[in-house]
Amino acid sequence: MQLAGQQAQINAAKMQAQADYGRQLYEDDWRMRQFDYQQGRDAAADKRAQEEFDYRKLIDTRNFDYQRGRDDIGDSRYGQEWNYRLGRDSVDDGRYDAQVAYQRARDAIMDARYDREWAWQTKKDNASRGGSTGGGKKKKIDKEIIYIPFYSGGGGGSTRGGGAGF
């Protein structure tokens, strides 16, 4: 009996060991499946994160390229406007210089005219005063006569003479 009891204990221990081994295999298999499942989830999350990163990078690159293009257009436009303004300034400077030269020429003409009028008036005044300022002597003053043609609207013309020609 003792032998049979020992045999039963050995069989029970064997069955227990087999049950423990089966349970251990089942738990290992379950852990492996859990590990594989988690690895799959991690890979899917990593893939999604990489896709989102790539998409954001694509959008950021596109936006950067667009903005750089807009900046290039703005810089080009500014450069064109700058060159246009330089050209306009050059034109304005040329126009101003021409106006100044024209005005100087007109001033010179007017100064010469004034000088002729002054000289003529001085001669006229001296002639009318005669000898009273000249110490009793009369001076003969030649009047300057300038003829300026005068054209009427109907053709033909007349010539007018005047003391100073003005």
Image (tube, rainbow, N blue to C red):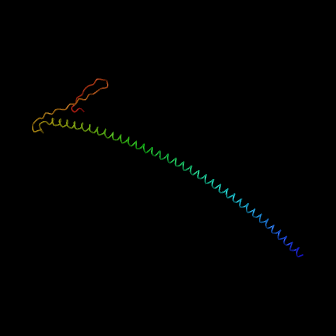
Quadrant of the drawing holding the N terminus: bottom right
Quadrant of the drawing holding the C terminus: top left
Taking depth in this image into account, of 99 and 131 the one nearest to the observer is: 99
Residue placed furthest toward the left: 136
| Place of residue 21 in the rendered image (x, y in percent of width and height, measured from the top left) | 79, 66
Residue placed furthest toward the front: 3
Classify residue 29 by image quadrant.
Answer: bottom right
User: Quick check: 94 above or below 4?
Assistant: above
Taking depth in this image into account, of 120 and 8 the one nearest to the observer is: 8
User: Quick check: 22 above or below 115?
Assistant: below
Residue placed furthest toward the bottom: 2
Residue placed furthest toward the right: 1
Number of numbered discs on residues: 0
Taking depth in this image into account, of 36 and 54 the one nearest to the observer is: 36
* Relative horizontal placement of residue 113, taking residue 84 as reference (left or right): left
| Place of residue 48 in the rendered image (x, y in percent of width and height, measured from the top left) | 65, 54
Classify residue 25 by image quadrant.
Answer: bottom right
Classify residue 128 by image quadrant.
Answer: top left
* Relative horizontal placement of residue 164, taking residue 90 as reference (left or right): left
* Relative horizontal placement of residue 31, taking residue 130 as reference (left or right): right
| Place of residue 145 in the rendered image (x, y in percent of width and height, measured from the top left) | 20, 31
